[in-house]
Amino acid sequence: MPHRSIHWFRKGLRLHDNPALLAAMRDCEELHPIFILDPWFPKNMKVSVNRWRFLIEALKDLDENLKKINSRLFVVRGKPSEVFPQLFCKWKVTRLTFEVDTEPYSRQRDAEVEKLAAEHKVEVIQKVSNTLYDVDRVIAENNGKPPLTYVRLQTVLSSIGPPKRPCPAPTQENMKDCRTPWKTSYEEIYGVPTLEELGQDPDKLGPHLYPGGESEALRRLDVNMKRTAWVCNFEKPNTEPNSLTPSTTVLSPYMKFGSLSARTFYWRLVEIYHGKKHSSPPVSLHGQLLWREFYYIAGAGVPNFDKMVGNSVCVQVDWDDNKEYLQAWSEGRTGYPFIDAIMTQLRTEGWIHHLARHAVACFLTRGDLWISWEEGQKVFEELLLDADWALNAGNWMWLSASAFFHQFFRVYSPVAFGKKTDKNGDYIKKYLPILRKFPPEYIYEPWKSPRSIQERAGCIIGKDYPKPIVQHETVSKQNIQRMKAAYARRAGREEQEPKSQSNKKGVKRKTPSVAELFKKK
C-alpha cells in the first residue's frame, strides 16, 4: 500500500542531500513536509532577532523550493509530543521521516515522538545527514568513547573511510505519484511566521548581510569554490579576524540550519583538491569540517557537555560571578577597542571571524575577566547566526583552556593580537566610530593618548568611551596562576582515582598537530 508520509524538517532545511526526505517520497501517495515551531527553544535559550530573521528566510526559501517540485512546507505551532498525535490522525499518516539529531534535547524529543508514532502504527525512518559521519558509529569504533583529540578522531575516521556522497535533491519526478494537499486557507494556518508573530521587533534588526536559505547557501558555496587557488591554500590561522569584509567563507550559519549539507561541501572540496597541491587538516577547509565533526561527536558522547559541573572532560575552575564585567563585555564596553569592536560586530551583524571569537572568549574567561565560559556560551548562543550547540560549548571550553586545549599560559593580548592584521585600526573605526579620529598609535590603547589628542578626536576616555575595565598586564598574570591551581587540583583528583575508573587520559594528551592554529598569537 502507498504511504501517507510526513517529513519533519528540523535542522536540515534543504532539499539537496536530504535522504530522509527522499525516503518520505518513496511509495508515497500523500506527503506533508512540516517544520514545527517548538516553544521549548525560545523558553530555554535567548535567540536574537537577527537569527529569527535568518530562520524565517530559510523557511520561506524551503517553501519556494518545495513549490518547484509540486509540494509545500507546513509550519506547525506547538510541542512535537502534542502536535504529532493530532497530525497522525488528521492526515492518516503511515510514515514519519526525519534527520538524526544528536543534541540532548533532540534525542529526548525524538524518543518521545518515536513512541507516539509506534502507538499510532506509524513507521519511523531516521537518516544521518547533519554530520559527515554517523556520530554513534564513530563513538562505537573508538571503544564506546568519543575521540577527545583531533589526531585520535582522524585515526578513527581513517578506519571508517571517507564520508558518504551526498544524495541528489528530489525533483518533480520523485513527486509524480505523490501529492501535497494544499488549500489557500492553509497560508494562515501553516504559513511561515513573521517576526512580529514571533514577538520580535524588526526595528532591532542589524544589516542584512547574510540572507537565510538553501538557495543563498548554494550560491555562496559556488562563489567560494570558484576561488580554487584560495581554497587549496586556505589555512584558518592565516585568515584575518578584523578584515572589513569576511576573510573566510561565512558558510557556518547555513550549515548550522542545515541549509548547506556538510557532505556536499566536503565532496566539492575533494573535486577541487584533486590533482592539486593543497593545505591539510586541521587548518584546511576539510579540516574545518572535521572540527565540526569533532565537537558534534564529543557533544554526543560526553554527558553535560555544555556545563562545567558534571562534565568529565572539563577542568573545574573557580570562576568569578561578576555581572557588571559580563554585561560590559557582552555590550562592547570593556575599554579595549579591539574587544569592543568584535562584540559590536557580533551584536549588530550576528557573525564574527573565528579568531575574533578566540580573542573575546579568552578575554572573558582565563585572559582577563575570569568569568565562566558558560556565561560567554549563552551570549554567543543568543547572538551568533551560526550558534550550534556542540560547537559553541566545545569552542568555549577550548578557548577557556577548560578542555581540549591546555596551554593556559598562552593568552591573547587584547591590544597586540588585532594590530598584527590591522595596524591602522580600520576595523575598530568601522564598529566604534566614536574612536575613528584617534591616530593609529593610540587606536588600540586610547587611554594612553594625551588629553589634547582625545579632545581633537572628540572622545574623552572615561567619559565618551570607557577606561579599560581591567589592566591586562596585571590580571592576565594573576589568572595564569589561578588556572595553574585549577589544573593542579584536577591532577590531584585524578591521582586519587583508581586507574580502572580514570578514562580522562585522552583529555590530557597534547595534540601537536593543532599547535600551528595558535602560531599567530
Image: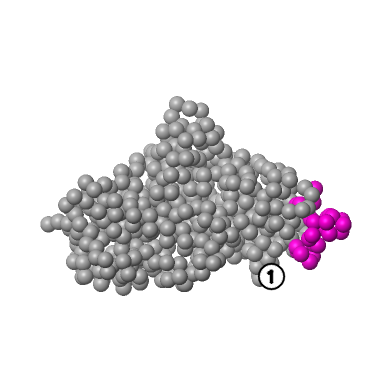
Local crowd size for mark 1, using a 10 Å CA cut-off: few (<14), some (14–19), many (≥20): few
Query: Residue at (61%, 40%) from the top-left corner?
Result: 238
Depth check, front residue: 505 or 110: 110
Residue 451 occupies which quadrant of the picture?
bottom right
Closest to the observer, 56 or 413: 56
SS of the residue under disc 1: helix
Residue 31 is inside the magenta segment: no
Left or right of 320 on screen, residue 152: left
Q: Position of residue 456 (x, y in %)?
A: 83, 56
Q: Residue furthest top?
A: 275
Tell me where residue 208 appears, x and y as whole percent: 52, 56
In the depicted structure, whether residue 94 falls above or below residue 249:
below
Name the residue tied to disc 1. 324
**What residue sits 45% from the left and 51% below the top?**
254
Q: Amino acid at mark 1?
A: Glu
Q: Residue at x 65, y 68 (%)?
A: 327
Residue 126 placement (x, y as % from top left): 30, 55
Q: Quadrant of the N terminus?
A: bottom left
As drawn, which residue projects farthest toward the left?
Answer: 1
Q: Which residues are magenta?
A: 441-467
Which quadrant is the C terminus positioned in? top right
Residue 457 belongs to magenta span: yes
Q: Nearer the viewer, residue 197 or 167?
A: 197
Report if residue 379 is visible in the image.
yes
Left/right placement of residue 86 relative to residue 500 reads left
As rendered, which of 437 and 266 lies closer to the eye? Answer: 437
